[in-house]
Amino acid sequence: MPAFTASAPGKIILFGEHAVVYRRPAIAVPVEQVAAKAIVNAELRGAPGSVKLLAPDIGMEAQLSELPASNPIAAAVLNAAGVLGISRIPACTVKVTSTIPVAGGLGSGAAVSVAILRAFSAYLGHPLSDEQVCQLAYEVEKIHHGTPSGIDNTVITYARPVYFVKDRPIELLHPRQPFTLVIGDTGIQSPTVKAVSDVRKAWQQHQDEYEALFDSTGAIVDSARTAIESGMTELLGPLMDANHGLLRKMGVSCPELDTLVQVARNAGALGAKLSGGGRGGNMIALVTAKNAERVAAALQRAGAVRIIITQVRG
């Protein structure tokens, strides 16, 4: 029997992180230079229900039955089997690899879930629809993030730019023109769940202040959508700068992110901001084709441990 394989890209949030948890809009795009991959191989001599899970990137090798349902990899497998009504899984090995940095704001957890759900459901003979994959990956996201917005699993499932509002139908974006981004990784792992939790505590203590920050973020997102869909992508730079300022006020930036953002601007980026949960992870900069390498080199000299140049296609 052939192996069943699926992959899923990374993602970055262009605008609206944190505010999106409070039902303001956000925009996210896939990052195809990094990806998670799942491979499912049948074990013809194995007993039914014997499912070995391998994740060499994190040193994991275990039987599904040995892991708690709160383990994200186990949860993805169990979710797929559950929605398909399969209680006795045919013996197999599920191997997961990923080039997406963990806890860096590039959607590592959601990409792993999407890849597993697709490969595993195909192995079971009933490939899940995009809608099913997205919903089941969201359930796993709750393990990673506590109160996720749903944007990671959405943009990664559909591998398209999305305009996203929690609990509203997905809207795919159609950029009029391609534009280029440089992603700079601080090298600081920062679990999103902690930043989301801290923002929630601050919101509970200062609701008027944070609601105003979220409203301002939402207005920026809508302006960015107009710029993207009209092809006026140069307008995204100042909007990125403004969004970063709001995220700083929310308390989710850090000195390393602020430094890389400023370095990118000084090197000629049209705008820059943190991307994702903050407190580490990645920042993004809007660049032109001519200065992308210059901005990337400046970020590397300033301490970025990983650089990705990606294009959001029209």
Image (cartoon, rainbow, N blue to C red):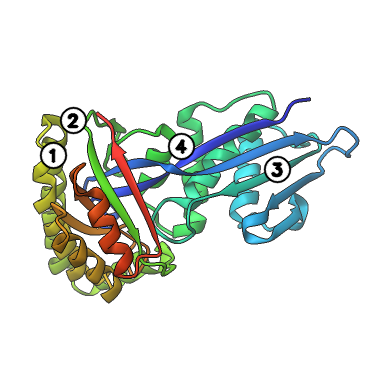
Residue 177 has which mark?
2
Q: Nearer the viewer, mark 4 or mark 3?
A: 3
Distance Cα–Cα, label 2 vs label 3: 39 Å
Whether residue 218 can be seen here: yes
Is the residue 60 above or below the residue 38 in the image?
Answer: below
**Residue named by callout 3:** 94
Please state the horizontal and vertical placement of residue 84, each as a whole percent of the image.
64, 30
Q: Is residue 54 left or right of residue 195?
A: right
Tell me which amino acid carries mark 3: Val
At a point 47% along the width and 38% down the height, the residue shown is 135
Instruction: Check disc 2 and report its element: helix, strand or loop.
Output: loop
Distance Cα–Cα, label 1 vs label 3: 42 Å
Quarter residue 1 falls in:
top right
Residue 233 has which mark?
1
Nearest the viewer among 122 and 70 is 122
At a point 68% along the width and 58% down the height, the residue shown is 68
User: For the residue carrying disc 2, how many other residues have a C-alpha within 10 Å: few (<14), some (14-19), or many (20+)?
Assistant: some
Distance Cα–Cα, label 1 vs label 4: 29 Å
Please state the horizontal and vertical placement of residue 109, each as a whole percent of the image.
50, 52
Is the residue 36 above or below the residue 266 in the image?
Answer: above
Nearest the viewer among 34 and 125 is 34
**Residue named by callout 4:** 134
User: For the residue carrying disc 3, how many other residues have a C-alpha within 10 Å: few (<14), some (14-19), or many (20+)?
Assistant: many
Q: Are marks 2 and 3 in contact (CB under 8 Å)?
A: no
